[in-house]
Amino acid sequence: MDVLVGVLLVTGAAFMLLSAVGILRLPDIFIRMHALTKAGTFGVTGVILAVILHFRNLEVLGPGLMVILFFFITFPVSGHLIGRAAYLIGIRDSERTRPDELAEALAKEKGEKPERGG
Amino acid sequence: MTGPAAGFLAGSVTLAMALLVAALFAALLRLLKGPTLPDRVLALDLITSLVVGIIAVRSISTGQTALLRVCVAIALLAFLGTAAWAQYIKKESES
C-alpha cells in the first residue's frame, strides 16, 4: 500500500510541476489557463488520493473527498471566468488562438439586445 | 512502519515535496513577470492549489490528519478569490 501511496504522490506532484511549467512557458493567457485547469486538477487529485489511501479512516475521507470535489467543480469555472475577463479587457497575445468564437457570440448578443428590449 | 516500503514512502514524500516547491518557484516567477493582471491571477490560483498539495504531503509526513481541513478551507477561499478578481477585471473593462 505504501508503494501505491508513493506512486500517487509523485505522480500528482509531477502533474502540478507540469502545470507550473505550462504557466511559465506557454505563450498566451488562454493556453496557460488550459495548462492550469487540466494538469492542476489532476495533480491535486493525485496527492489527495494518496493522503486518503495512506490514512484510510473516515476522518480523512470526508475532507479529502470534499477537496477533490471542490477542485473539480471550481477549477474549470475559475479558469473560464478569468479567461472571459481577460478577453473582455482586450488581451489577444498570440495569433495562434483561432477561431475567435466569442467575438461572434458577443456581436450577436449586441445585435439582438435592442430587439429584445423593443 | 518498518522495512523497505517505509523507506520508499519517505523517499517519495521528499521527492513530491521537492517537485511541489519547484512548481511554486515557477508560479512565483510568472506572478512577478506576468504581463497582464489575469496572468497574475492565474499564477495566484496555481499557487493556492500548490499550497493545498504541500499541506497534503505534509499531513502524510507528520501524521496530522487535521491538516486536511485546512486544505478544504483553502480550496474554497481560492475559488472565491479568483471569482472576485474576475468580477473586478470585468468591471474595469466596462468603466
Image (cartoon, rainbow, N blue to C red):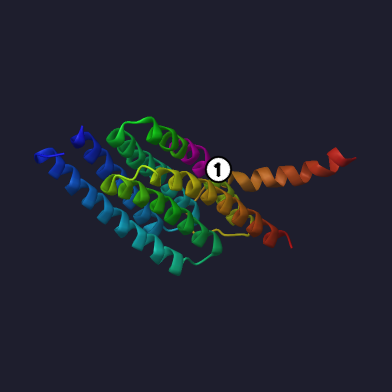
Q: Residue at x 42, y 64 (%)?
A: B30
User: In which quadrant of the rendered view does residue B2 lie?
Assistant: top left
Relative to B30, say whether B55 is above or below.
above
Q: Residue furthest bottom?
A: B32
Q: Decide if residue B56 is on the left or right side of residue B41.
A: left
For label 1, the residue is A77
Q: Residue at x 40, y 49 (%)?
A: B52
Residue type marked 1? Val
Residue A99 visible in the snapshot: no
For the N terminus of chain A, which image quadrant?
top left
Q: Main secondary structure of the magenta part?
A: helix
Estimate the x, y position of residue A72 in percent, counting from the top left.
Answer: 47, 37
Q: Secondary structure at mark 1?
A: helix
- The chain identifier of the residue carrying mark 1 reads A
Residue B93 visible in the snapshot: yes
Q: Decide if residue B60 is on the left or right side of residue A100.
A: left
For the C terminus of chain A, which image quadrant?
top right
Tell whether position A72 is magenta. Answer: yes
Q: Decide if residue A51 is on the left or right side of residue A107.
A: left
Estimate the x, y position of residue A64 in percent, counting from the top left.
Answer: 41, 37
Estimate the x, y position of residue B82 in percent, counting from the top left.
Answer: 56, 53
A55 or A113: nearer the eye?
A55
A62 or A70: nearer the eye?
A62
How many marks the image carries: the answer is 1
Q: Residue at x 36, y 50 (%)?
A: B55
Q: Residue at x 17, y 48 (%)?
A: B11
Q: Residue furthest left?
A: B3
B31 or B9: nearer the eye?
B9
The span shown in magenta is A68-76
Estimate the x, y position of residue A68 in percent, counting from the top left.
Answer: 43, 37
Relative to A26, say whether B35 is above or below.
below
